[in-house]
Amino acid sequence: MSDRAPRRVVVVGGGVTGLTTAFRLTQADPSLDVTVLEAGDRPGGKLRSIEVGGLILPAGADSFVARKPWAVDLCKELGLGGELVSPASSGAFMWTDRGLVPCLRDAPFGIPGDVGDVFRWPGISRAGRRRALLDLVKAKRTTDADETLGSLIRRRLGDEVTDLAVGPLLGGLFAGDVDRLSVRATFPELEAWERSQGSLIRGSQAASRNARRGATPPPMFVKPRAGVERLTDVLAERLGDRVGTGTAVRGVMRAPGGWRVETDGAAQPVEADAVVLATPGPVTAGLIGDAAPDAVRELDGIPYASTGVIPMVYPEGTQPALQDGSGFVVPRGKAPMTACTWVSSKWPSEAFGSRAVVRCYVGAVGEEDILDADDDELVEACARHLAAAVPLPDAPEHAEVVRWPASMPQYELGHLERVARIREALPSGIFVVGQPYDGVGVPDCVRGAGETAEQVASHFAGAPMREETVR
């Protein structure tokens, strides 16, 4: 089968990663027969919106990081560059026992680069600020071993800053526990700051100084005006009938000269020269169990966190209750939500009128039990805590709960080495890509998709499949 033309590639998973991989494959070699198989009734994966009180609100990511250029570049390539918008409000708040306090501005990764800002660090006690200043004089670590994100921040800035300020911000992006997340797999810049500057504070200062050089720095976050799913919608349009929805893949088996992809309801399995699995790790493990047992053992070692989002729409006249900013983050265990975005401030729309529109985030490693509550309980708990922090009514007019079970892979110590072992253990012609391996954000998934498409092209350009692949 590997000698026949055109070669066929099956991409399993129609989220942004799978769609981008397929798009890049068709660009690299228009002769390829590329098929995307998506189990859901629409492509896009977690990049989708829902209707809440007559408004269309994001159910997954509401934007992507602009400093990582891959998603922005793809949008421009697809003709969406003119649709990209940045938040209308900047700055965030931190949940404290005394109420919301503003997070430091111009502080990369939440770490101040100015000694004066350390002395004025909102929400941090005087003792906590003094401890943070020791970062300027403490010797840097000399060992080369990876460490947890929490270990690095605690060692440099102290426990209080870690638990109340920097940890909630950085750990929240992974729905994780900073004391378990690998710094190299999550924020390697921090390790580089200590190594090059001997201090996180001086590293932040250098990063801010570099960002200010030359042209005006780009916004931190952007999105297409109609929503992040506009990216996957256009990718699906470009791919056309190559994308098949409502097609659940049940297994990937060896076949003479290649692979056989078995699906629900199909009279015949799909034959392929190469298969790209753009699926969550547990799904991938279930699909290749017989073909790659060593890879499956490593896949099973990646833990996942379950999360949820709760979009809430308040009555007309409530928008002024929200302070100027984009929302707030919550230290672990202080409230039922881990963060809250003020959608109507961050992404204002005429459709909102004068209504306050927010999204609460729930669930994380160690905080997943809250997702066992029913929808009404979740909405009530989040709304009650929100009303204690800002002058909003005790309950919204409209709310929905969107659960994302086992949705966030945890990049714990050794994660990068585990990913390398997974890919090394895959048989020739099988590729994995997406959040479990390449980064949890949209830009990282886009980057990983491009790299995977190149690897598939190299696979086809190289030697014939190994003997064990065609048995």
Image (cartoon, rainbow, N blue to C red):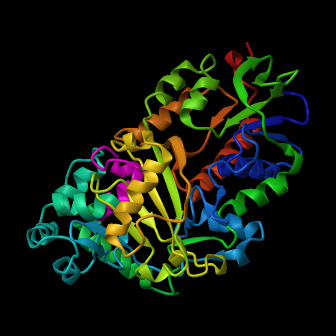
Query: Is 99 positioned to the left or the right of 290 in the image?
Result: left
Query: Is 459 positioned to the left or the right of 344 in the image?
Result: right
354, above or below 313, in the image: below
Residue in the foreground of this view, choosing between 377 and 49: 377
155, above or below 456, in the image: below
**x, y percent for residue 158:** 16, 60
State the image quarter where residue 351 is shown: bottom right
Viewer can see residue 65: yes
Find the magenta span and give its range.
169-193
Q: Quadrant of the N terminus?
A: top right
Q: Quadrant of the C terminus?
A: top right
Q: Residue at x 80, y 16 (%)?
A: 256
Q: Residue at x 23, y 50 (%)?
A: 151
Query: Is 64 positioned to the left or the right of 94 in the image?
Result: right
Q: Residue at x 65, y 40 (%)?
A: 278
440, above or below 359, in the image: above
The answer to if 182 sits in the magenta stretch is: yes
44, above or below 468, in the image: below
Residue in the foreground of this view, choosing between 402 and 190: 402
**x, y percent for residue 160:** 17, 61
Viewer can see residue 173: no
The answer to if 88 sits in the magenta stretch is: no
**x, y percent for residue 288:** 63, 23
